[in-house]
Image (cartoon, coloured by chain):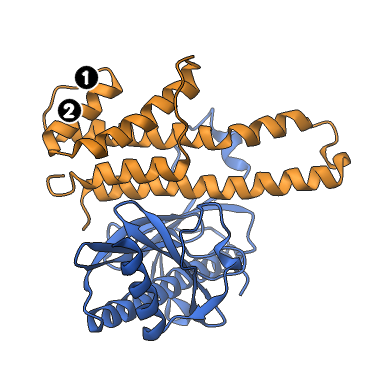
Chain colours: A orange, B blue
Amino acid sequence: MPNDAFNWMGRIKAVEREHGAIRFGTDRLIAAVNNDPSILEHQVRRPDIGTASARLEGTYIIRVLSEFETALQHFITAMHIRKPRATETLVNRVRDRGHIPQADTDAVHRVREYRNFLVHGRTKPTPPVTIRESTRALCTFLSRVQGIW
Amino acid sequence: MARRHVAEPAFMVSIYDDPATAGALRFTFVPKGIRQARVEEEPHQPPDYIVSVQGHGDEATFNWIRPPMQDEARKSLEQIARQRATARHEWLEKLGVLVANVEEWAGELDWATRIVTKKMDDAEIGNYDAPGLLIQQETVRLFLEPIARAAPGTEGLVDLYLMPSYDDIASLYYYNNRWNVHYVSQAVPAVANMLEVPARRLTKATLRKVLGEMKAHAQ
């Protein structure tokens, strides 16, 4: 039976696959609307579809990071480590407990900072990350604690 | 090739391992529409009909725990249970053969393997544990992960990932009564439709090519 870390990695990847499915559907919808705007009738407005499409990847990055945070909370509980309030501290405590390389931790913080930019609209420039980059960073980080969790 | 739909909209059906009988599945049937009307009066009323099913196909046997009054309704529900138990059995058998074949071929190609289980959730055939396969050679780790029993154009989907980054390598689709590998050499964006990638029949030679290219790409 795979360990908990492995199961959480699978859950994070599943969210990425969901994004792929919704991206596919949204692209098809936009193409269909461009071809025949009358299909919208009065239920949905065209600008809203465009906005949803533009923000889709960010929405799913927020979701994958949410899954990741939940995984770390479970890890912290299992390891009897005091729970911090901030995600940054949470990540760093797991890093310390799992002896995780700083490069892997930095990759997670880049996702976290971009998520904060998306959610809180901070003006500080934050390099964007793709959902693939996000999932890769989060799964790689979690894989480092597979030996103990 | 198309997904088999169970034409029975009158009930909500849930399926789970029978806690009282090893190897059996327990089906609960709740009539649609009636439940909402009863909620305020009897919020904790148990499911309306319950049956335990052992086996599948024509060999399926039914042990009713809470049967319907009418014989016709009982036969109808047994037919639903039989179809779903059979679909579940066929899918798990299909997966088991795939994992066993890949495990054998990978071993012959000097890759270490380990079978793992993944918890799956399927509205039609219930929750179940599906076999997956971890494959490793030196520092290159791959995961053959079951994804879905049915999807448009396929009767089964299994993905092959590079671990631990979960990079997409290939997708295996079951159609034309065999597993087909959809694989491109370079990294594929997550949004790509792998079904549009030219397919190769899954054989030991195909697996050797995929694993070999993957190892070269990863190192």
Question: Camera-side residue: B69 or A88?
Answer: A88
Residue shown at the point (38%, 56%) measured from the top left: B16
Task: Between residue B3 and residue B46, name the one nearer to us.
Answer: B3
Q: Quadrant of residue B207?
A: bottom left
Q: Position of residue A135 (x, y in %)?
A: 39, 44
Where does the image place residue A9, in percent across and percent down from the top left? 32, 47
Which of these two is toward me, B189 or B18? B189
The residue at which mark 1 appears reads as A84
Tags 2 and 1 touching, CB below 8 Å: yes
Question: Quick check: do tags 2 and 1 share a chain?
Answer: yes
Q: Above or below — where is A110 with respect to B64?
A: above
Which residue is found at the position 47% from the left and 40% from the top? A130
Mark 2 belongs to which subunit? A
Q: Quadrant of the N terminus of chain A?
A: bottom left
Q: Would residue B158 be found to the left or right of residue B104 on screen?
A: right
In the picture, the disc for residue A93 is 2
Q: Amino acid at mark 2?
A: Arg
Mark 2 or mark 1: name the one nearer the start of the chain.
1
Which chain is indicated by disc 1? A
Does residue A44 appear in the picture of this structure? Answer: no
Front-lying residue, A51 or B28: A51
User: Which residue is located at x 35 percent, y 50 percent?
Assistant: A10
Tell me the amino acid under the disc marked 1. Answer: Pro
Q: Secondary structure at mark 2?
A: helix
Q: Where's residue A138, x and y in %?
A: 32, 40
Residue A107 visible in the current orientation: yes
What distance separates the C-alpha of mark 2 from that of mark 1?
9 Å
